[in-house]
Amino acid sequence: MRNRLLLPVLLATCCIQVQAKETPADNYKAYCVQCHGGDGKGGGVNIRDIAVVPRDHTDVKSMSGRSDETLFKAIKEGGASIDKSILMPPWDATLSDEEIKDMVQYLRVLCKCNFGS
Amino acid sequence: MRKTIFAILLGFSGAGFAGGGMLQNECSTCHNITGPAAQTLKEAFEKKGPDLFYAGNKYRQEWLVSWLQKPQRIRPAGMYYGNHIKAGAKGDEVDVSTLNEHVALSKADATSVAAELMRLKPHDDLTAKEKIGAGAISKQMGEMAFNKFLGCMACHLIEPEYGGLSGPEVYTAAKRLQPEYMASYIRSPQAWDPKSWMPNKHLSDINIQKMVNYLKVLSEETENAK
């Protein structure tokens, strides 16, 4: 009887947690598009007066030159952590590690490339 | 006929609203006045106006009274910028045709709504943690930090035509916002709004103070330039 009651509670907990994780497409739309642009090519709505042009996420040459670990670090800790622009902020307080991992894979889809390819 | 037009004009200007209950009725159609903040991006994308359920922790009452009578755009690209951009020749541009104007209220209604808003203070705990010192910073040094060292200008206008567009303009920030709120939001945007577009840049206490002081200098200059 107790198990019967416990199961729905466990299921509810599991589903609430699953719901809390956003899709990489939505996270990209929310946080990345403002600088990297709706098409990911670096032409976001903020670039008019920006000192450093944001990365073109569809550029195979530059994106394949960065490992997944480097991309993860840049998203989590900001551009300065990989000796790039401070204009790329750290998103560690916004995205979970799991969401950042998903985002790295999403970037691989955008550039249609892997590290070293 | 004239009476009908007059009634429509009154309604449009907001002067026709009754004093009490406006917040719960009219304002709540675009603003979250009860909390909690959006917990999912789906909810966040649909926001039409800023959350007001902590307005008493956020705004300066005198600014609210004045702004509600003569609203001016604070977010150049709207609440969720993604709903108001279009592809342009050099990248994304704000599609102003999709932006809505805020209704203007009569003085009496603005005063009454502002008083009601100031009673909404669920985040006293957050603002109480902030101690604002009397420090000063020159506009030049402040701008250098805001732009070059901290990168805040990427998303915020520091002049009507200079800066980023996805966040609220900051050249009137100190006029509209309480200093403790500014400090607290810079310290942790997610403590106020888990899905905020603004990242936590982990500023030190000293830099938070510097930025609050810079925003004060900036607002004073904007006011003087009028």
Image: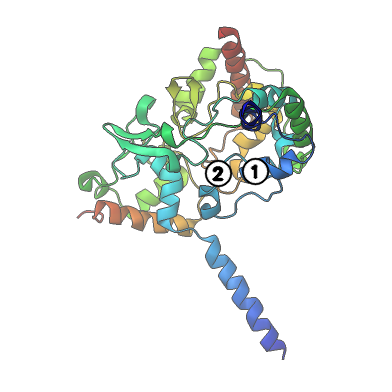
Query: Which residue is identified by label 2?
Result: B196
Q: What amino acid is at disc 2? A: Ser
Horizontal and vertical percent for residue B100?
51, 35
Image quarter (top left, top right, bottom left or bottom right) of the C terminus of chain A: bottom left
Answer whether residue B174 is visible to the viewer in this image. Answer: yes
Q: Nearer the viewer, residue A99 or B113?
A: B113
Quadrant for residue A114, please give it: bottom left
* Disc 1 from disc 2: Cα separation: 8 Å
Q: Provide the chain ID for the residue under circle 2.
A: B
Answer whether residue A51 is visible to the viewer in this image. Answer: no
Q: Nearer the viewer, residue A60 or B20?
A: B20
Q: Circles 1 and 2: CB distance less than 8 Å?
A: yes
Query: Which residue is identified by label 1?
Result: B192
Quadrant for residue B120, please give it: top right
In this picture, is A103 found above or below A42? Answer: below
Q: What element carries label 2?
A: loop
Horizontal and vertical percent for residue A36?
35, 40
Q: Going by the image, does B174 lie left or right of B200?
A: right
